[in-house]
Amino acid sequence: MLSQKNVMKCFVAKKGDRTLAGLLVSTFNGYLNEWGAGQSTYAIENKLYANDMLKWHIIKWGHEQGYRYYDLTGVNPNPQTPKEQGIYRFKAKWGGRLVAYHEYCLKAH
């Protein structure tokens, strides 16, 4: 439904009949926001970097469609664990910049 409204896009990498990976992005106001990524066991075991390939194709596609930003959506700016450090490194390698967003909570009175 959201894909028909041009709000969400799901990009899938395949090798033959095998699904290797998928990335879900939302599209709004010149922004692509990444929401979900998945990778098959086959891709992991065979060191097929399908998510890297998908991300590159999304960047190319987004540029061709006139999107101005691709937000990789979330990272700890001061990574503490090996997992957080890996996420930070992975996202940093794409050459973007880290943008801090502030969180606000509106409470009803």
Image (tube, rainbow, N blue to C red):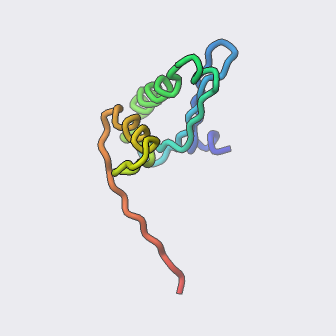
The quadrant in which residue 4 appears is top right
x%, y% of residue 31? 43, 44
- Foreground pick, 59 / 46: 46
Which residue occupies 56% across, 37% down? 37
x%, y% of residue 79? 37, 48
x%, y% of residue 90? 40, 34
- Foreground pick, 28 / 44: 44
Count up the numbered dots: 0
Q: In which quadrant of the rendered image does the N terminus lie? A: top right
The quadrant in which residue 67 appears is top left
x%, y% of residue 87? 43, 40
With respect to residue 72, does 45 lie above or below?
Answer: above
Among all residues in the image, which is located at the extreme top? 16
Which residue occupies 44% across, 33% down? 62
Which residue occupies 53% across, 19% down? 48
Among all residues in the image, which is located at the extreme front? 81
- Foreground pick, 16 / 59: 16
